[in-house]
Image: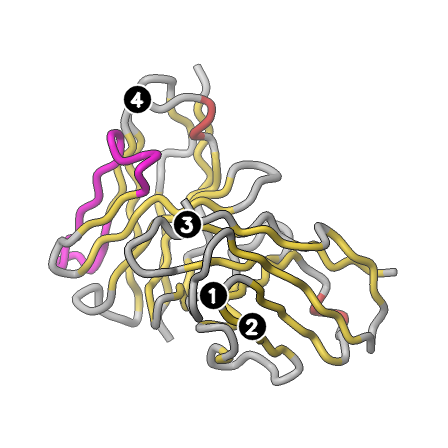
Amino acid sequence: DIQMTQSPSSLSASVGDRVTLTCRASQSIGRYLNWYQQKPGKAPKALIYAVSSLQSGVPSRFSGSGSGTEFTLTINGLRPEDFATYYCQQSYIDTTFTFGGGTKVEVK
Amino acid sequence: QVQLQESGPGLVKPSETVSITCSVIDGSVSSFYWSWIRQSPGKTLEWIGYISYSGITKYNPSLKSRVAMSVDTSMNQFSLKLTSVTAADSAVYYCARHWSSSWDSWGQGTRVTVSS
């Protein structure tokens, strides 16, 4: 399986901050990288697909970049509703889809 | 906007089979591929497998021997069966819709606890 490693596992930030989360794949996955947001007790919510395309309705303060094995999710101007856990996920062709361990964004 | 609604037994005994159904609301199961994903308490997400509207399946190799998925287009739903369950299978089970190699719509999840 392709292993997905997210860093940091948690971070503290304030409203208005610019936050960058990192996701690394154990082998190249091209642009088959997606991001999800999950709040406690809720289902994950799709944020970004194919590295940098926003899902419908996702605010433009979220952006993604990267290719191959290293990817980032950036939140520009953190808002109160953005405090959550973020997961990356690879969907490379003919592989077992796997998720990273998550990054929890907490209030500083 | 499509909605997904899981329904499951809640509590299952060890070694038994758990069956969970996902109803597709305001959309059709007869398009797209559909996945099952689970999350054990405090853990990350684990993809279980997917099924297409025509019945094509792909399962996570780690669960393949115990998993079966089916689709019922007349009922607009799809289902998951997991056999020989143990405590390690206790989790929240989600159904989700594939879109552009990601999952764009998720159900709210159904909790399954394996305990005697």
Between label 4 and label 2, give the one nearer the viewer.
2
Which residue is disc 4 drawn over?
Answer: B84
Between label 2 and label 3, give the one nearer the viewer.
2
Q: Which residues are magenta?
A: B60-78
Q: Position of residue A78 (x, y in %)?
A: 76, 74
Which residue is disc 1 drawn over?
Answer: A33
Q: Position of residue A14 (x, y in %)?
A: 85, 69
Question: Dot 4, crowdedness within 10 Å: few (<14), some or many (≥20)?
Answer: some
Instruction: Give the chain letter at badge 4.
Output: B
Q: Is residue B60 left or right of residue B93?
A: left
Question: Is residue A41 inside the magenta stretch?
Answer: no
| Label placed on residue A66 | 2
The answer to whether B21 is drawn above or below residue A87 in the figure is above
Q: Are marks 4 and 1 in contact (CB under 8 Å)?
A: no
Q: What's the residue type where badge 3 is placed? A: Tyr
The answer to which of marks 3 and 4 sits earlier in the sequence is 4
Question: Dot 3, crowdedness within 10 Å: few (<14), some or many (≥20)?
Answer: many
- Real-space Cα separation, disc 2 to disc 1, in angstroms: 9 Å
Q: What's the residue type where badge 2 is placed? A: Gly
Q: Residue furthest top?
A: B116
Q: Is residue A104 left or right of residue A96?
A: right
- Residue visible at 39% across and 47% down in the picture: B47
Instruction: Give the chain letter at badge 1.
Output: A
| Label placed on residue B94 | 3
- Residue visible at 41% across and 68% down in the picture: B104
Q: Quadrant of residue B5?
A: bottom left
- Real-space Cα separation, disc 3 to disc 4, in angstroms: 19 Å
